[in-house]
Every structure is written in structure tokens, then in C-alpha cells.
Image (cartoon, rainbow, N blue to C red):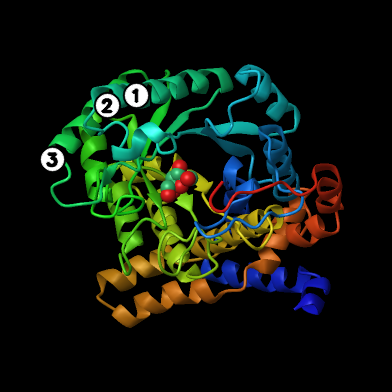
Amino acid sequence: MQKLRETGHQAGYELLAETLDAQGISIDQVKEALKNQKIETASWAFANSGTRFKAFPHPGAATTTRQKIDDAATVQRLTGVAPTVALHIPWDKPEDGDYVAMNQYANAQGIQLGAINSNVFQDNAYRLGSVSNPKPGTRQLALDHILECCDIMTKVNSDNLKLWFADGTNYPGQDSLRGRKQRMEEALKTVYDRLPEGSRMLLEYKFYEPAFYSTDVPDWGTAYGMCQKLGEKAQVVVDLGHHAQAVNIEQIVSFLLDEGKLGGFDFNDRKYGDDDLMVGSVNPYQLFLIYHELVSAEYSDHKVAANNARQVAYMLDQCHNIEGKIGAIIYSVMNCQEIYAKALLVEREKLAAAQAAGEVLEAHRIITDAYRTDVRPLLAQVREEMGKPADPLAAYRSSGYEEKIQAERGVAATNGGFQ
Ligand code: PSV
Ligand code: MN
């Protein structure tokens, strides 16, 4: 494969361009879409992480937010499609409290700060939950934190407030399920009314963990219902690791798009639980089918779905426990590029005709043909046209950045589990 990568991509690119031309697909349109693709990185993915058993320290892993910003800027420099980095508060609270300076620092490194993620799951006060907690004082503590996140958004020019709640119960009878729903809705309403001008609230769902019996926003239907009540600035986030096995995520995506309620993605992959592995590493076909729904919506004449598809916030929410950080994040971005490119190659008109005629096998074949196309020469061409390395991961490995941060930062101490 190494040899194949080194022989250049020109012949493969030209063959694909000819094929697309014969199919009536504009290669320029495909390349334009790929150049405009955006994937947000997450600050916490640059730091050490682990399981509840052990967090292995990776030499050079970021410990400060400035280091995380430096690493995110490196990913952007090499890929050109990761211009923003999401923050998690208080993990990314500046020591001097100066968010404006932190934002300026990020901009000077060539990136913008992205979604502000609140954290209402780490304090001791949250044993029985945050905004759904039976105690009013704890609910207020959590609410104050989320409202502080709204203020931070204004300081760092962020348009997205991302909310995930660990709230739930461990035992039947522990609390009133309806009571918890009502407390959650009340808090969300207060936050919604305080969203900065022009921003969105992105609500994440997760079916279990850390709560084991009930979770207060367990699925997309609950998140959708809550967002629907709140108004148009509230939308649902789909984290690929937050479903039971075998759930059809692409169908959820299609439903939300059709309703204009898809806010964004937390991209990752998994085999069993919320494993936070690299996106596209275990089930790239699922990722392709999700991207196919997005592309179909974007190029459809259904206005709501098309507009929604253009505003989706794509983010990597992953934990790199044993494979190193920055290389893994670059590779994840490349996976998103590859899968998006394949989805752009679906012969959509032919597909619609096959579907209308009830030609099951033909419709399926059109989809799988696109999935099986080797788009790496196309992406190498796109990257070169963007002034980026054809193989960002190889470029990272030979850049000396990893050696530099290892020498400068050393090996950070970690505790037993998730940091
Ligand atoms: C929860 O599992 C989650 O996916 C949420 O997005 C959090 O904000 C993130 O992980 C980081 O803990
Ligand atoms: Mn997530």
C-alpha cells in the first residue's frame, strides 16, 4: 500500500474523472463540496483519556487548553477542513479566566473556537443528577454553569451550545420519571431563553451510562420532542456511540433532516458500547449511509431538509486511549473526507428512478457502487488543489511535530481512568 500511495494519484484521478463525466456527475462540483467540508475537532481528544481501568499517558499529549489549540491548529494546517475546535467547560477554563485572550490565541494559530460543551457531570454535587436533580439547590448550580457557558459563547464567538446530561437514575423507584422530565424541560427552557443572538442549542441524547436504569434524555425521540417544544434554535445532536446495538442511525438522521431538527454530529465509532473509537474505523459503511442521507437532503428540492443539511455541525467526539492523539485525529478527518466523497458519487437521479420503479437490486447496487469506489486519488487531487499534503497523516509523521511536543511537554501524569 505504501508503494501504491507513493506512485502518485494522477492516473486514478483521471480515470475517475472520466467515469464521472460519463455518468453526468460534475467532478468540479464534487471537488468544490469536498473543499468546503468541515469537521470540528474536540479539545479533550488531544488530552490523555482512558477507561475506568486505566488511562495510559501518551508522550506529548496536551494538558493545557493552549496546547490543545496548538494541536488542533496542526490538524487544520495539514488537512484544511478542520477550522474549529470545540471546548468543554470547565476543562478548558483559562487559568486567568480570560476567554477573549484564549479566543485571540486560537485565531492567531489559524483556527476558531467552536461549540461550547457544558459539563454538568463531574461535580460531587451531581450524584443524583444536575438539572433533573431532586434538590433545587443542585439544579440551580447546574443551571448557573450552563448559563455561564452562554456568556462564554459570546466571548469566544461561538454559535453552538452543546448540552449532554448524565442525568438519570440507577434503580427503579429512585425518582419520579415524569418529575425528572419536567425538571429537565424547565431548565432547558431557561437556557434557551438565554442563548446568545444567532446561536443554537444542540441537545445530545444517550440511552445509558453513567446512569444504568433510566437516562433523562435517552433517545433521539425524546431530544426531538424537547427541541420541538423549545423552538427553532434547539436541535438534536447524534453521537454515533449513543444508541443500542443495531439501531438504524441513518434513518434517524433522515427523519431529523426532514424536520429541520438535525443540529450536529458527535462522530466516533464503536463495537459494543459508547467506545469513542475513530470514526469509520469499525463500521465505515454505516458512516457512508449517514453521509448519503445528508447529501441526498442537501441536493433535494425539499427546502427544510436542504437548508438543515447545510447547517449541520460536524464534530469528532472521540477518545484516543492507545493510538496516540494527533495522528488519530488526522486519520479520522481523512475517514470523513473519504466517506463524504463516496456519498457524493452516488448517482442520485438514477437512484431515484430505480426507487420509483421498485427496482430493489438496482437501487441497492447504485448505492454500493459508490461506496466501493476508491476515492483516494480524488482526495489527493483535492488536497493538492487546496495547497495541502496529499497524505496528511504521512505529512504529520514526517513533520517533526510529534517529536517536538514530546520533548517540550514530556509525559503528563494521569490518574486511573478518564481524565
Ligand atoms: C457523553 O458520552 C459525551 O458523548 C458527551 O458529548 C460529552 O460532552 C462527551 O462525551 C465528553 O465527555
Ligand atoms: Mn458526545
Q: Earlier in the sequence, mark 2 or mark 3?
A: 3
Answer above or below: position of 254 versus 183.
below
Asked whether the beta carbons under mark 2 and mark 1 sit within 8 Å of each other, the answer is: yes
Q: Which residue is mark 1?
A: 143
Residue lying farthest to the bottom in this orientation:
361
Give the number of the disc on residue 247.
none
* Mark positioned earlier in the residue sequence (2 or 1): 1
Relative image position of residue 301 (x, y in whole percent)? 34, 48
Q: Amino acid at mark 2?
A: Ala
Which amino acid type is shown beneath numbered disc 3?
Ser
Of the image marks 3 and 1, the number of the one nearer the N terminus: 1
Task: Give the left or right position of residue 355, taking residue 237 as reference.
Answer: left
SS class, disc 1: helix
Q: Secondary structure at mark 2?
A: helix
Residue 149 drawn at (x, y percent): 46, 24
Foreground disc of the pair 2, 3: 3
User: Does label 2 point to a residue whose CB lies under 8 Å from ligand 1?
Assistant: no
Q: Which residue does the numbered mark 3 point to in the structure image?
A: 176
Q: Is residue 322 visible?
A: yes
Task: Report the side of 35 relative to 216 (left or right).
Answer: right
Q: Is residue 146 left or right of residue 9?
A: left
Choose between 274 and 75: the one closer to the eye: 274
